[in-house]
Structure formats: structure tokens, C-alpha cells
Image (tube, rainbow, N blue to C red):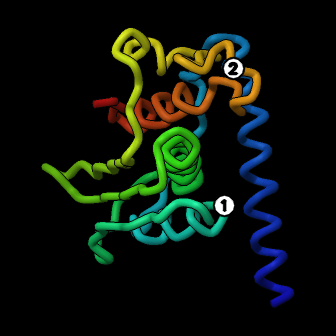
Amino acid sequence: AREEMISEATDQARHMSRLVSDLLMLAKGDMSQMNLEIQEVRALSVVTSVLRNIDFTDTRIDQELDAEVKVRVDPDRLQQALTNLVTNAIRYGGDRCLIVAYVRRKDLVFEVHDNGGGVPTRFESMIWQHFERGAHRLDATSPGLGIGLSIVQAVAESHGGRAEYR
């Protein structure tokens, strides 16, 4: 149990260190400097790490993952991006969330679905911008800084991919 606690604390410290680094890059307006530590990992292990580190007691989270899907990525960055997506789904998307991972033409695709009302059309193009909170921009009771989705986009692009909302 002690080793598991030390491992989790180490993971969280590394995550916080990268988040601070990301905030500095965001403040400079340049996420292209993102450092990647590429490894081969299973998509399932990344999802397991995400779910271990967030509170989703009021949300049912289902998964559609092929346990054998392996990909060469920076697992910490992928976990960071997926955590931001799942956290947004929990925060704004209702009481159900579905995480899907599959490979399409050698590309790993993650999808996060929820049963919420979605992003109002007039904010769809803004949600990827730094410090943008869309429909919640003036709502002080709604948590968030508006950096999560811009980090998601930067992580996807740094891996040669993209982030989309639909």
C-alpha cells in the first residue's frame, strides 16, 4: 500500500509540474514547445490512470476499449488531455459519460461522450482558445480557468493529431 501511495504521489507531482509548465507556455501564447516523452502504452492503462485520479461519484462512466490497443505516445500528456475531456464531461455533461478508444488507419482515436446539452453553437469555435470558458465565461460558480481544452488541442497536435468537438 505504501509503494502504491508513493507511486500515486509521484504521478501527481509530475502531473502538477507539467501543468505549471503548460500554464507558462499558455501565458506566452506558445504551446508548440511541449516536450514529449514517447513510449508504447496500452490505451486501457491511460484510461485506468485517468479514472483513478478523478472524482466521478455522481457520474456513470462506461468504456468501450480494446484492451490490446497499444500506441506510441507520451502517456502523461495523453492522460492529461483525457483527464481534461472527462472532467469537462462530468462537470458540464450530465450524469453519464462514455470513453471510447480505437485505432483508425494507424491513429489512436479517443472519444468522450456525455448526455449533456452540449456547447451552444455560438461558442463551439471558441472552446479551444486559451482561457476561454464558452457559455460559462461569466459564471463564477462554475469552476475552471478555460485552459483544459486548449491543452487538449496542444497535446493532440503535438502528437500529430487533432482535437474536435461535435
> Does 124 sit left or right of 141 as displayed?
left
Residue 153 drawn above or below residue 9: above
Q: Amino acid at mark 2?
A: Asp
Estimate the x, y position of residue 52 in percent, counting from the top left: 62, 69
Q: Position of residue 157 (x, y in %)?
A: 41, 30
Q: Is residue 26 above or below residue 78?
A: above
101, above or below 8, in the image: above
Q: Residue furthest bottom?
A: 1
Q: Which residue is denoted by mark 1 in the rendering? A: 55
Residue 2 percent location from the top left of the image: 86, 87
Residue 143, picture quadrant: top right
Residue at figure coordinates x 84%, y 75% from the top left:
6
Can you give x and y, in whole percent of width and height, for residue 85 in the image? 49, 43
* Badge 1: residue crowd in 10 Å (few <14, some 14–19, many ≥20): few
Q: Nearer the viewer, residue 12 or 57?
A: 57
Compared to residue 161, the image places residue 30 above or below, namely above
Q: Amino acid at mark 1?
A: Asp
Q: Is residue 94 left or right of residue 72?
A: right
The quarter in which the N terminus is drawn is bottom right
Which residue occupies 76% across, 22% down?
A: 140
Secondary element type, mark 1: loop
Residue corresponding to mark 2: 139
